[in-house]
Amino acid sequence: MASTAPVAGLKIFSTCPPSNLTPQPEYLRRIRDIARWSEEAGCEGILVYTDNGLVDPWLVSQLVIESTQRLAPLVAVQPAYMHPYSVAKMVSSFAFLHGRRVYLNMVAGGFRNDLAALDDHTPHDERYARLVEYTAIIQKLLGSADALSFDGRYYRVTNLKMTPPLPASLRPGVFVSGSSEAGMKAARELQATAIEYPRPAADYAPLPAGEANAHGIRIGIIARDEEDEAWHIARARFPEDRKGQLTHELAMKVSDSSWHRQLSEIGKSGVSAANPYWLVPFENYKTFCPYLVGSYDRVADEVARYVEAGYRTFILDVPAGPEEMAHIGDVFERAVCAFAIG
């Protein structure tokens, strides 16, 4: 089986299925299976979603750890749900109990109705300012054995200490999810990896010096030997669906996420039929990221363009099966052959 990672300096993650789109009797098995497929394919970790309508991401992450030997849960963390000390405690507890590392995907946004239900009416950009303080507390608690005192605009702690202490080798990687300028600024302040929902690769120029390796994208991939076969599989897996389109339109009305608006605008303008960049799954509410579809070489060329622009982290969509991970692995191997990563 072709391996997706580690590939010449890339970090590749898969994604757990959201609980609201999986029948309850199947959910535990699906999590275990996808975690194992991802590990066997060589992924660094696996994204675990969070929002008001999903099961708790920390409990899902526990299941991922129990089902694998080294796969790292990439846990979505929303400040509205828990105190930063609780997040740090979960990270240190996983390390203590299992000797395992996790990643944190810091999320500032969400559906407005979800935030309003929690009495959180903080404006979009201010949520990222709050996220910086929140994440800084987590990083400081996990990065030192000393007691922490912090007096910020949104959070205050006094002589707070993390017990059990976290071994330096298990400190979490930190991602900031968001394509807006506020999200990018937050990632820079935290020295975190900024995760974007990308535009077509042709839209990108190389990142500024010093920012390469600090950016990643969320993307789905369907690739086969022949272009027509890949598109046949893609359209069968993600058929156009009027109910899904209406759900997407409703989601647009209750979301203030920049990435959601940006992808929707790209969908309105359309892309060339020859372009592997495909938004039908997103527009029909089947998933939350663009797809790249086509032959191995065509999709690999598109991935190589993202790499050339400076993107080194890729978060893949929920895999359809272990064979799909092998096809994706083939794409990444061809991509790194097309672009030598320093």
Image (spheres, rainbow, N blue to C red):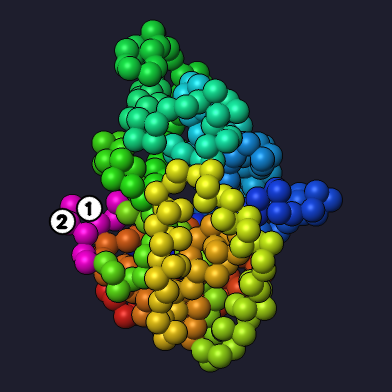
Which residue is at the front of the view, 43 or 267?
267
Coordinates of residue 235 in the picture (x, y in percent): 62, 78
Location of residue 284 (image quadrant): bottom right
What residue do we see at 55% from left, 64% from top?
Answer: 283
Q: Horizontally, is 323 left or right of 133 in the view?
A: right
Q: Is residue 208 above or below residue 61?
A: below
Is residue 108 in view from this perspective? yes
Coordinates of residue 190 in the picture (x, y in percent): 30, 36
Location of residue 209 (image quadrant): bottom left
Are discs 2 and 1 less than 8 Å apart at CB? yes
How far apart are the two marked residues, 2 and 1, measured between alpha carbons?
6 Å
What residue do we see at 63% from left, 55% from top?
Answer: 247
Q: Amino acid at mark 2?
A: Ala
Location of residue 142 (image quadrant): top left
Say which mark, if any, is on residue 235.
none
- Give the quarter of the figure containing the C terminus: bottom left
Coordinates of residue 279 in the picture (x, y in percent): 50, 69
- Look at the magenta stretch and give its main secondary structure: loop
Question: Considering the numbered disc 1 on the image, is that residue within a helix, a strand or a loop?
Answer: loop
Q: Residues within 10 Å of mark 2 (few under 14, many from 20)?
A: few
Coordinates of residue 207 in the picture (x, y in percent): 21, 59
Q: Which residue is mark 1?
A: 211
What residue do we see at 67% from left, 78% from top?
Answer: 236
Q: Is residue 211 magenta?
A: yes
Q: Which residues are magenta?
A: 205-214
Which residue is at the front of the view, 309 or 239?
239
Farthest residue toward the right? 25
Q: Which residue is mark 2?
A: 209
Q: Residues within 10 Å of mark 1 (few under 14, many from 20)?
A: some
Question: Considering the numbered disc 2 on the image, is that residue within a helix, a strand or a loop?
Answer: loop
Q: Amino acid at mark 1?
A: Glu
